[in-house]
Image: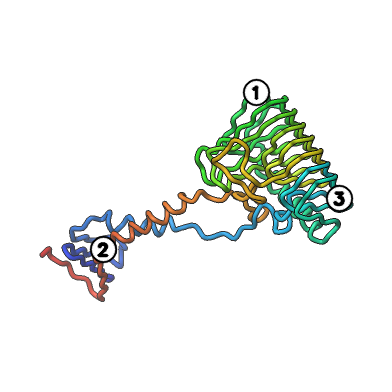
Amino acid sequence: MSFGHFEVVMPEVRFSLFTNAQSGNLQDVEGYMNTKTFVLPVLALCFFPPPPQVLAGPLLGSSLINYSVVAGGYVVYGDSSSSSGPVGAVTYITPGAGSSSDGNFINTADVHSALGELAIARSAISGMGSGTALPATMSGSVTLAPGVYSASVLTTVAGTELKLDGGGADNPYWVFNLDSFVSTGASTIMSIFNAGPKASVVWNTGGYVSMGASTVFLGTILSNEYITAGANSTLIGNAFSNSYVTLGADVTITSSNIPASGTWAGSLGGMASSLSIVDGVVVAVPEPGAMVNVVLGLGLLSLMCLRRGFRVRQSAHWRPHARP
């Protein structure tokens, strides 16, 4: 006994098939159509469906992202220092003469919430692993592509240039997982280029971060210990510490363009905006073109079928059809 007659009719093509109920094997295929036009879109939709949308939280939580500086202890910033965002601390904040910020907040519920989010962010970033090992000391001019980097300790010789080349990506990221401390020599300059506005640079340290005088430091700092910045230094990013933060005279924490780099413009939370946390795991925001290509490809394949005017009919009994 046979059943299951399907007839597919197109403007110039007729295609029929039936199966044997006892053997379950294909007995006859009659017709003439370009099977690529019909089969490939179906297989693509069945086996390569668009991935489900995942709800993810940002790497920097809703409280933490509001601050330029957060300390689990105190914050002291020197004369004429400035912070483009708010400063939060648990114990006290001592601003120097002529210094400024977007507000000082001491021992508030939001500050404690921010410190809790700092712990979550540090744990998630640590989970990204060690990646590429860095030497303990950098000197001269060093260029790094996006990725995860690690070292036990990291120091830079005075005058070192650390250049981060995004390779033209919209959402590149550089993650530095350091077991202990980071210490930059005087006049160390960090810069980023060939990167979109959502580039992320994150320094996750088990120890302290110390910036020498006149350093230009780039990135969001997630420090388990203290953070210090020498006189006339600049931080493009955020300083988050479980301990204390001290800024020397004329230190600037800013969200403006990086010096000598016209290809990137950051924001207060911009140094971690391409990274999210899903179930405690860091997930990079996909490049805009990646998902667009998948969706467009499937859409075009489906339109090929629609344009050819497929019509499917099913009847209770099969019968072969001769070609017209």
Whether residue 4 sits left or right of residue 60 in the image: it is left
- Where residue 305 sits in the image (x, y, percent)? 28, 61
**How many angstroms separate mark 3 from mark 2 (CA)?**
69 Å
Q: Nearer the viewer, residue 22 or 213?
A: 213
Instruction: Determine the residue positioned at 69% across, 26% down.
Output: 159
- Where residue 181 sits in the image (x, y, percent)? 77, 35
Q: Please tell me in which quadrant of the rendered image residue 144 appears.
A: top right
Hey, what amino acid is under mark 2?
A: Arg
Of the two numbered discs 1 and 3 in the rendering, the one whose residue sits closer to the viewer: 3
Asked whether the beta carbons under mark 3 and mark 2 sit within 8 Å of each other, the answer is: no
Query: Which mark is first along the chain, 2 or 3?
Result: 3
Query: Which mark is first along the chain, 3 or 1?
Result: 3
- Where residue 192 sits in the image (x, y, percent)? 59, 37
Instruction: Determine the residue positioned at 33% across, 57% down.
Output: 301
Per the image, the residue denoted by label 1 is: 140
Whether residue 167 sits left or right of residue 247 in the image: it is left
Per the image, the residue denoted by label 2 is: 307
- Where residue 8 sits in the image (x, y, percent)? 23, 66
Q: Nearer the viewer, residue 279 or 75?
A: 75
Query: Which mark is first along the chain, 2 or 1?
Result: 1
The numbered disc on residue 93 is 3
Instruction: Determine the residue positioned at 66% across, 37% down.
Output: 130
Hey, what amino acid is under mark 1?
A: Gly
**How many angstroms separate mark 1 from mark 3 (CA)?**
37 Å
Instruction: Determine the residue positioned at 10% across, 65% down.
Output: 324
Whether residue 98 sits left or right of residue 261 in the image: it is right
Hey, what amino acid is under mark 3?
A: Ile
Q: Nearer the viewer, residue 28 or 56?
A: 56
Mark 2 Cα shell of 10 Å, populated few (<14), some (14-19), many (≥20): few
State the count of labels. 3
